[in-house]
Amino acid sequence: MAMQVNFKTVSADYQIGPIRSANILQNVNLHLPSQSFTAVVGHTGAGKSSLLKTINGLLLPKEGDIQVGELEIHKEPSKQVLKQVRKSVGMVFQFPEAQLFAETVEQDICFGPLNFGVSRQEAKQLVKDVLPLVGLTEDILQASPFALSGGQQRRVAIAGVLVMKPDVLVLDEPGAGLDPNGKEEILTLLQALHNKNGTTIILVTHDMGDVARFAEDVVVMGNGTITTHQPVRTFFEDVKQLQAWSLDVPEARRFQLRIEQETNIQLPWTCLTIDDLATALIEVGLA
Amino acid sequence: MNKLILGRYFPGNSLIHQLDPRAKLLAAIGFIALLFVAINWQSYLLLIVCALIVMRMSGIAIKMYIRGVRPLIWLILFTVTLQVLFTAGGTIYLDCGPITISKYGLINGVFIFCRFVLIIFISTVVTLTTKPIDLTDGINKLLSPLRFLKVPVDDISLMLTIALRFIPNLLDETQKVMDAQRARGTTFGEGSLVEQMKKLVPIIMPLFVSSLNRAEDMADVMEVRGYQSTRPRTSFRKLAWKKQDTIAIVIMIILTGIIVVLRQLGGYYP
């Protein structure tokens, strides 16, 4: 079962001691349909991470409410609701390997399911199910998470979230600090999960190339508000607007514009990936 | 996490902020010593008034200081209760075997309460108004005579600097790890004491790991940049002792004089 996420006039801020930060989120209205793959982009401090945290009830709205499927998070949600929300919304933080703590990989991945009241036996089975998803094998289970390489730690940490089979998956720069291959694999994994299980995915990233290749919709944030929410193809069409938001133009799209400029031939659609571009070029007879 | 006030710096431009860290440290140590010299209500009253004036002068809301006391309130009340119950002398109000509530006990309890709270207040004034780096510079300078006794003063102050420097990082990291584990279904502040302690493991372990990693990186970086603990170091920031610092110390000496006189005059109990 997949879930939609709905923000209704959400405002939120952090209270740190006496210092109340200005509204981190201001009057956010956002509808993320069930089974969508949305990329959230924007500059540092635009409120992207805070937006993610509100979906999981880690940051509670000061005003407004957030609907996750049937559940509703408002100013003071009950503990049951929070627990339900956290069970159905998986959250992968930036550098998630920082959350590893257990003696063995198996114990660490089991942590979530056990917290949500799954029996030890079942949890172990869930762990075995989740490993292939993140490209790990069972022989790693008894190893200490701290003895693994950075990339493997990342996978274990992500497995620790995926193991609960969340309907909504929220990720904050899951590829940050990984080599290009590792990053690629993690994003492909997300896409597979999205296609196979229909998991609603919300991904914060800085890489417009990734946005173009993996996301279906794009949300741009600035100063705690939603600047725009568009399907990815429409979004990358208007290059001037992208530059105004000082966002990068993906490589394939840039290449397309160059070709159009040089040949004076308009390609039939906005190309997001290299393959996309190749097909378009064949279509108009340039390749 | 955010309730921790002690050990935080609040930028400001008050007279207290401008004092030399050495003056502040000396005055604070002197004040705390005076709290143990004071034995009657007149001197406590005087010390409370002085503390309030200093807190006022720091330009930081009194509420903040009270918040600094809050985490320790149970420890304070526990100690005070012990004092009240187990001090004998004076008029006895209640007598149940070894437990008596006596006049002396009550007075002692009140004094100890004041002592605790004032110690926290005054040390909070110092930490809230002094940049951590100034504080360690000050400690370094104050301890420097110990160098002749082969105490590694520079190493100690460097360790202090590093420790203080990383408190905010550690707090941020704690928050992050807590969020991550909460997202995985842990609920803090629930269940029996043992259960709650078990729930701390998933927070403390990652913090240990990252702290150790960071310490190692930091040691490498320091070595690469030529740090050697055996060599004397010069300092980039020089502390300057000004007139106001001398005045602060003079006020402290006068206060000490008054408290000592009050002790002679007032006798032990009112």
Image (cartoon, grey):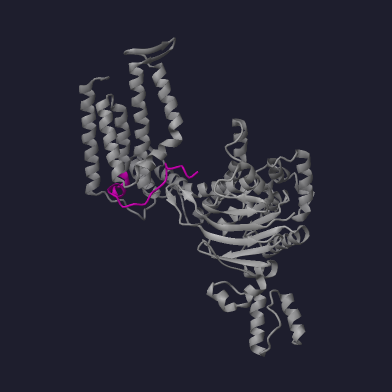
**Horizontally, is B110 left or right of A225 in the view?**
left
Taken as a whole, is the magenta stretch helix, strand or loop?
A: loop
| Image quadrant assignment for residue A273 | bottom right
Residue at the farthest top position? B97
On the image, the x and y values in percent for residue A174 come to: 65, 58
Toward the viewer: B171 or A139? B171
Task: Please indicate, yes or no, whether residue A188 appears anywhere in the rendered image.
Answer: yes
Q: Looking at the rendering, in which quadrant would you find the C terminus of chain B?
A: top left
Residue, x 33% and y 16% (percent of image)?
B103
Residue, x 32% and y 33% (percent of image)?
B32
Toward the viewer: A272 or B118? A272
**Horizontally, is A121 left or right of B154 in the view?**
right
Q: Is residue A248 above or below residue A82?
A: below
| Image quadrant assignment for residue B140 | top left
Q: Is residue B126 above or below residue A229?
A: above
**Horizontally, is A138 left or right of B204 in the view?**
right
Q: Which residues are magenta?
A: B1-22
On the image, the x and y values in percent for residue B262 come to: 22, 26
Toward the viewer: A38 or B152? A38
On the image, the x and y values in percent for residue B186 come to: 63, 42
Q: Is residue B75 above or below residue B231?
A: above
Residue, x 69% and y 77% (percent of image)?
A271
